Image (cartoon, rainbow, N blue to C red):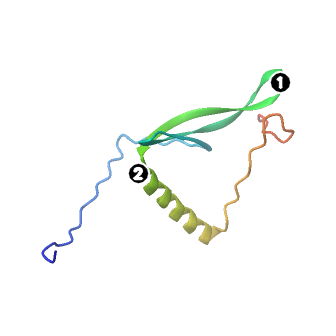
């Protein structure tokens, strides 16, 4: 199709209804049609018998179709790779199991 011209489309970004939140953890689930991402905070609490525990407080839920989820995964992979090229590997710490002596504690 030699007659087709490549056209640029202007992208406008509307941030008037945007909110920002911080999340230190994510829970994922899915259906046949969608991916569900729950973003939130792991908060230390006292469990049964005064054992340390974590409460996952969900702050935001994002639901997307599979193609959008794949685009997100690709985009995150690219931005993480760029960050690590500039700053070194990001270390992921495994959260200790509830009841572990190294479990997070509430600040004094």
> How many badges with numbers are in the image?
2
Residue 18 or residue 66, whichever sits in front = 66
CA distance for labels 2 and 1: 43 Å
| Mark 2, secondary structure of its residue | helix
21 w.r.t. 5: above or below: above
Tell me, for residue 39, which label it has, or none.
none
Q: Residue at x 48, y 60 (%)?
A: 74
Tell me, for residue 50, which label it has, or none.
1
Q: Which residue occupies the extreme bottom position in the image?
A: 2
Q: Residues within 10 Å of mark 2 (few under 14, many from 20)?
A: few
Quarter of the image for residue 50 reads top right
Q: Residues within 10 Å of mark 1 (few under 14, many from 20)?
A: few
Residue 90 or residue 21, whichever sits in front = 90
Residue 31 appears left or right of 52? left
Counting from the top left corner in percent of width and height, residue 95 is at: 74, 44
Q: Which residue is mark 2?
A: 68
Q: Nearer the viewer, mark 2 or mark 1?
A: 2
82 w.r.t. 15: above or below: below
Q: Earlier in the sequence, mark 2 or mark 1?
A: 1
């Amino acid at each position: 199709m030699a007659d087709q011209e490549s056209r640029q489309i202007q992208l406008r970004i509307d941030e008037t209804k945007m909110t920002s939140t911080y999340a230190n953890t994510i829970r994922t689930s899915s259906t046949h049609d969608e991916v569900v991402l729950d973003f939130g905070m792991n908060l230390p609490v006292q469990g049964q018998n005064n054992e340390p525990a974590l409460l996952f407080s969900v702050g935001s839920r994002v639901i997307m179709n599979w193609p959008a989820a794949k685009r997100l995964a690709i985009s995150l992979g690219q931005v993480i790779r760029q960050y690590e090229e500039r700053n070194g590997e990001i270390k992921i710490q495994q959260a200790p199991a509830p009841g572990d002596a190294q479990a997070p504690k509430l600040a004094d």
